[in-house]
Amino acid sequence: MKNASKKYNIVTFGCQMNKADSERMAGVLENMGFEASEDPNLADLVLYNTCTIRDNAEQKVYSYLGRQAKRKHKQPDLTLIVAGCVAQQEGEQLLRRVPELDLVMGPQHANRLEDLLTQVFDGNQVVATEPIQIVEDITKPRRDSEISAWVNIIYGCNERCSYCVVPNVRGVEQSRTPEAIRAEMVELGKQGYKEITLLGQNIDAYGRDLPGSTPEGRHKYTLTDLLYYVHDIPGIERIRFATSHPRYFTERLIKACQELPNVCEHFHIPFQSGDNDILKAMKRGYTHEKYRRIIDTIREYMPDASITADAIVGFPGETETQFENTLQLIEDIGFDLVNTAAYSPRPATPAALWENQLSEEVKSDRLQRLNRLVFASAETRSERYLGREEEILVEAQNTKDLNQLMGRTRGNRLTFFPGKIEELQGKTVKVKITAIRSFSITGELVEVLS
């Protein structure tokens, strides 16, 4: 192939959706004959798959990009690409800021990479940010793991949270058909993958845009229906899904997770704030009371389920009392993990224009206090594992201790134990837990289950 001796490097910023997009774009490049390079400075094609949800992630992209732009002056054959959310947000502005770029492409265009590169190799500078119907997966992604795989089920988001740039950069909701999703999962099962994470920016919205409804008047295709449709695929032992929205989370979904043995007891449901006035200003569409009821219902059905979430502190106008309501929610619920962030104003979002912005000092202080509580809560939740025997799917070697293997419980707790990777990778094993930390646990191998 014409690119057989050429190398590519992809740097990924941001969420699981971006990681999944990067795997698909890597698959396109390898299908074109490129080889992966871990060193961007040795690559003939460098692609930054970007995130714009926080300002610091966006600035890091520009820092990395500046280095490669300088390199291109010495190596004009270098192909330089910015993909993802910053690309979608900035569009042609990026070319004015970094004229060395060859291709600027939004996340909806990930599967069009080969077509777009053909235009680039014909001598064009290309911007692809126009809204399009999602192009179905047409190539095999280059998966980072040999055990676990991402499967997108819905792209985009129709929510209009006042702080969030995602709908502007990822477009409107577009669900893949159940048949296409199952076909991809069947193929992954044949390839030896054991765990699938179903992905969506707002995964509970799955199916709303697909035609048809049931006699009861609900959408014909929901996330719950999809789980029943794909739960029994040969070879797939574990199914996870993320990210959920409290507004659409249903008891029917919880019951399905309890009933289906391959669906893991792990729920990632961002709450963002524990104060109703802040939630209203964020346009989240629920109260902290509703959020608490969801968690109570999960624990009625699955008392041991892992609950993880996202939280934002320092939202415009947030008072000390309102911040303390967030701390109270975390204390009351007891989360296994909370991803935390200080509010960051984003372009073209309503909250960025409000005058009641908080100082960086206040935001930093609150973030530190929040993180201390999250750390303590996670450690308390880890204590339940001590002395128990847990089923662990073995993923990889522990890079910090090559005598240890790494895997996860069904509740997604990172687990380390002694063993040989060549014997146990991809196996499900039973591990007795002997030590706990806030975000991981350690144990001893008891037996190999499969």
Image: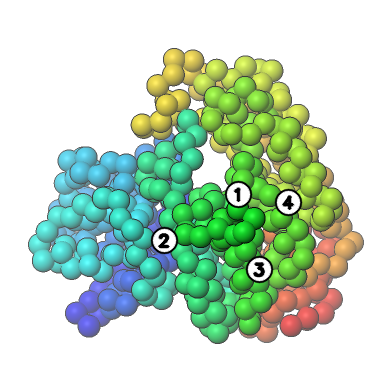
> Residue 21 — which label?
2
Of all residues shown, which one is farthest toward the left? 123
Count neighbours of disc 2 (C-alpha within 10 A) and say few if under 14, some if 14 to 19, many if 20 or more: many
Q: Position of residue 180 (x, y in %)?
A: 47, 72
Label 2 vs 1, first from the N-terminus:
2
Asked whether the beta carbons under mark 3 and mark 2 sit within 8 Å of each other, the answer is: no
Asked whether the beta carbons under mark 1 and mark 4 sit within 8 Å of each other, the answer is: no
Name the residue rendered at 49%, 40% in the picture: 159
Residue at the spot of label 4: 251
> Residue 228 — which label?
3
Tag nearer the camera, 2 or 1 = 1
> Residue 244 — which label?
1
Regarding residue 33, the answer to whether it shows in the image is yes
When the figure is inspected, residue 228 is found, relative to residue 87, above or below; the finding is: below
Q: Nearer the viewer, residue 149 or 302?
A: 302
Q: Position of residue 116 (x, y in %)?
A: 22, 63
Q: CA distance from mark 3 to mark 2?
A: 26 Å
Instruction: Answer with left or right where residue 449 lies relative to residue 125.
Output: right
Q: Quadrant of residue 62?
A: top left
Count neighbours of disc 4 (C-alpha within 10 A) and say few if under 14, some if 14 to 19, many if 20 or more: some
